[in-house]
Image (spheres, rainbow, N blue to C red):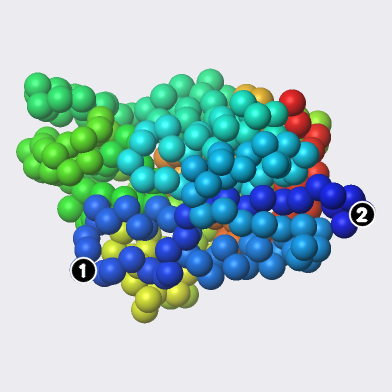
Amino acid sequence: MVLRQNSRRVVLVADPIAGLPDSHAGEFNRDIDRPWSATIEQIHTGLASVCGADHVITYNSVSDFIDNARDHRDDIVFPYWFGQRSRSRHGLLPAVCEAYGIAFVGADAFTKIVCNDKLLSKSIIRDAGLQAPEALQLHAEQDLERLGLIRYPAVVKPNFEGTSLGIADKNLVDSAHGAEVVARELMKSLRQPILVEEFIEGRELSICLLGDHESMRVVEAMAWEINGDPAFLDKRLFTYDLKIDENLRAEPRYVTGDIDSGTMAAAVKVFRSFDKVDAMRIDGRLGPSGFSVIELTPDLYLGPDGELSAAAAARGFSYTDVLEFLLDSALKGRT
């Protein structure tokens, strides 16, 4: 990394909150989808160790960055801004960078927008040879009559959200009637298409990937062990309330050996089906019929205690090694 020897800076754009969302606010509180201030501080510290503290600057909004974008044409943007309601929010900052010709870390706008659409991304998943649970999408109240077409139990969830926004225990339903009740609530609260998806019982895990079209640095599978129990999530959803419960201890565990080589190769194929990604999680469940993909996540958690960092450590890479690769990859992929 040569940033210490020249004037190129790293521009961290983020929208942090102080800490965990209010536990009384419920599963529709969008703060769950924003990074903690402590995480941003950890990323800032890591970037500073790679390129020097005087080479890292931070903006807390996309609009502030845009106001100063012309000053950063020779810098590298590190997007960690998650936005609020727009279904294209994850792609806004990469799109701005592309428009200005500024190098940036992570997936491009197209990749982020496609992956944020859970139903659309299923076609990419299946084209690569991976399994995905059957699902149907509800756009309006008249679509509710189609709920008899899906197999139950099923998960009812918003099509364009992440981080378990809108997800509670009640979202796992065993009948069309139960699905209708939850779907109506989600439509009213989130005002977007709702996905009703076959529930896959089994180990919830992520295939973590770091690399590019030339070489892959990390291709490892990680699972969350909750309070020491590796099967904690096998028959339940990773709900909003679990993610903000300070009494739960979640630790990533290395489970690559549980995944067959064909599945891992297909995961790399998914990764490389996009033009610019750099890092991605392929989230799913390992059930009786193998690994089934739930969603593609290019907006993954990049703190030192996350799954990607743990997966990189399994390959002998430090947290700063991961950050350095991401910055180098941004320069390599600069338009």
Q: Residue at x 37, y 64 (%)?
A: 243
Q: Is 126 displayed left or right of 268 in the figure?
A: left
Q: Which amino acid type is shown beneath numbered disc 1?
A: His
| Left or right side of 68 for 234 | left
Q: Residue 312, located in which quarter of the rendered image?
A: bottom right
- Image quadrant in which you'd find residue 52: bottom right
Going by the numbered disc 2, the residue's amino acid type is: Gln
- Residue at the disc numbered 1: 24
Q: Please state the horizontal and vertical placement of residue 143, each as a whole percent of the image.
A: 14, 23
- Residue 160: give its label: none
Evaluate if marks 2 and 1 touch, with contact meaning CB atoms under 8 Å apart: no
Q: Is residue 229 left or right of residue 140?
A: right
Callout 1 crowding tier (Cα within 10 Å): few <14, some 14–19, many ≥20: few
Q: What element carries label 1?
A: loop
State the residue in front, 299 or 312: 299
Kindly identify which residue carries mark 2.
5
Label 2: which secondary element: helix
- Residue depicted at 87% across the width and 57% down the height: 4
Whichever of callouts 2 and 1 sits on the residue coming sooner in the sequence is 2
**Residue drawn 51% across the image and 24% down it:** 124
Horizontal and vertical percent for residue 308?
63, 55
| Residue 264 seen anywhere in this rendered image of the structure | no
